[in-house]
Amino acid sequence: MAEPLSKATLAALFSSSLGRWGGRGLLIFLGLRLIFWGLVFPNPDEAYYWLWGQHPGLSYYDHPPFQSWIQGLCTAVLGRSILVLRLPNLISNGILAATFYRLGAYLYGAQQARHRFWLLMLLVACSPLFFLFLALAWPDHWLITFTVLSSFYFVRFADSYRMGAPVCYTQLFASALFLGLAGLCKYTAVVVGLGFLATLLSYPGLRRLFFDVRLYLALALLLLVLLPVGLWNWHHDFYSFRFYGDRASLGSARSINWLQPLAFLALSAMILGPVHSWGLVERRLWRSPPEFEGQPGSVYGTLALWVFGLATGGFTLLCLWAPVLYYWNIIAYPLLFPLLADWFYRPDASPDPASPPWRRPRLLALAQGLGIGVVTVLLAHYTVLPLTSLVGPSDRDSAALYGWPQIAARVRARASHLNHPLLFTTDYRSAAALAYSLNRPDVIALSGRIDQFDFWYHSQSLEGQDAVLLGEDWHPICPAHLAMFDHVSPVARFTVRGFGRGLQTYQLVQGYGFKAGPPGYPLQPDYPLAVSRDGESCG
């Protein structure tokens, strides 16, 4: 892992004129990040991963297990709070920054590294995509960190091997280890592995590595790290792999949507940052591979382009027949940031320490201004009021962040009239948020959508119990829900409001004598809720 930077290195970093120029902007971004970490109620998926951490396992249905392992460890040691929930982000962000500095020093030399580092940090901070996904307690912040670490060690090894210099095979094994850890975060890490393979095939001097047994030992280490995912799927009928296969094939029987790839690329370019995207186009990396003063002929540029091309090309192609979310492609960009920073850097700058060695300062200032503006709007959207509610109905994902103290209080009041009741909701999002709010890891989602709760569903312990069931207008309580009880109370409704605007309406019902069905009931075709695949309607 990236070693701590020395005092001399830190002193050199803070003596950079670029650091002084961009320091105000970075402090603003840091302040906004701290506000986000301290004030924004956990996104439902953040609460979902927290809940996984309270149910230790080899892996999980929706994602591999690394994020949940870290959440479980932090909660066990430090307790449950929003700051503890997002503490791993602070750690991963620090490791990522140190790795980017060492990568810059390797590629461009120690003399330029301090200036390039500040450029790179400014570009990462002012990208709305990276501000958000390095701040959310989702697996993505670890995915980004581990893929950059793995790529750093791979490049150092591959450069030495190709040039015939003394080779440190520890770097190859470190690369495999960190790639495996990235795979324990999200399955999209496979794109980086394919980028490594494509890079090896691109250089004749690297192809002979395929005849070196140590390459296969590194591959064995990679597979060993990923073993928990394989074992979980082996014992659960490969449900996780089938889930992603189904998502990739969704809609394949329908006609091809030729406009969807254009919408995906346009949204990706905007959320990465207009200046960032323009810089990558203007840089024309595909025509003129970058040269690195510190490591002439390094494979880094080739690797960065392979990862970007494979990820972006693959997801753009998938858009033709299946819906693709813009952030799935986040794996494409981290390795491009050092190359994008080079677009702003002027290596022949004046030696005057007060003169920043840059080009295009107005564009860099524009990128910062746009980033601060977008992030401020996002913070208002997540902490004050969903801004979509100002022009119409608030979007449901954002509305799901609001009102949980009120919702939890109402559920607690209903539960107080029953003897140790079960707590159910109609969707994994509300179940996770309720579990986090009440610190009750035993909350269960009853939904037609397959999720991790279906693998925690133990019929024997649920049979005949009384329960409180929470629904909302996005995932309503259906007759099929009510039929799973011997009898139920009348449905009570209440609306969560913000500044007088209705954000989301919830329903509460008390159920008596829950009919849990046979073992594995939610995964069986006769499960009553299976008629509604996503839970957004009653079938």
Image (cartoon, grey):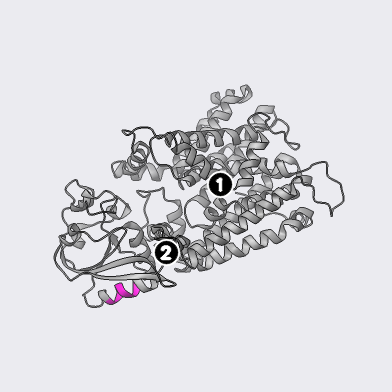
Q: Label 1, on which residue?
A: 270
User: Is residue 148 something that shows in the picture?
Assistant: yes
Q: Earlier in the sequence, mark 2 or mark 1?
A: 1
Q: Label 2, on which residue?
A: 401
Measuring 45% from the left and 36% from the top, which residue is drawn there?
Answer: 259
Does residue 516 belong to the magenta stretch? no
Please tell me which residue lies in front, 99 or 409: 409
- Whether tag 2 and tag 1 are in contact, CB under 8 A, the answer is no
Callout 1: few (<14), some (14-19), or many (20+) C-alpha neighbours within 10 Å?
Answer: some
**Measured Cα–Cα span from mark 2 to mark 1:** 24 Å
Q: Which residues are magenta?
A: 408-413
At which x and y percent is residue 413?
A: 28, 77
Name which residue type carries label 1: Met
Q: Quadrant of residue 427?
A: bottom left
Label 2 secondary element: loop
Name which residue type carries label 2: Leu
At which x and y percent is residue 461?
A: 21, 62
Please tell me which residue lies in front, 407 or 275: 275
Callout 2: few (<14), some (14-19), or many (20+) C-alpha neighbours within 10 Å?
Answer: many
With respect to residue 106, does 419 lie above or below?
below
Question: Which of pointers 2 and 1 indicates the residue nearer the eye?
Answer: 1
Measuring 73% from the left and 50% from the top, which residue is drawn there?
Answer: 362
Label 1 secondary element: helix
Measuring 63% from the left and 30% from the top, which residue is drawn there?
Answer: 286
Measuring 37% from the left and 70% from the top, which residue is drawn there?
Answer: 496
- Chief secondary structure of the magenta span? helix
With respect to residue 441, does 124 lie above or below?
above
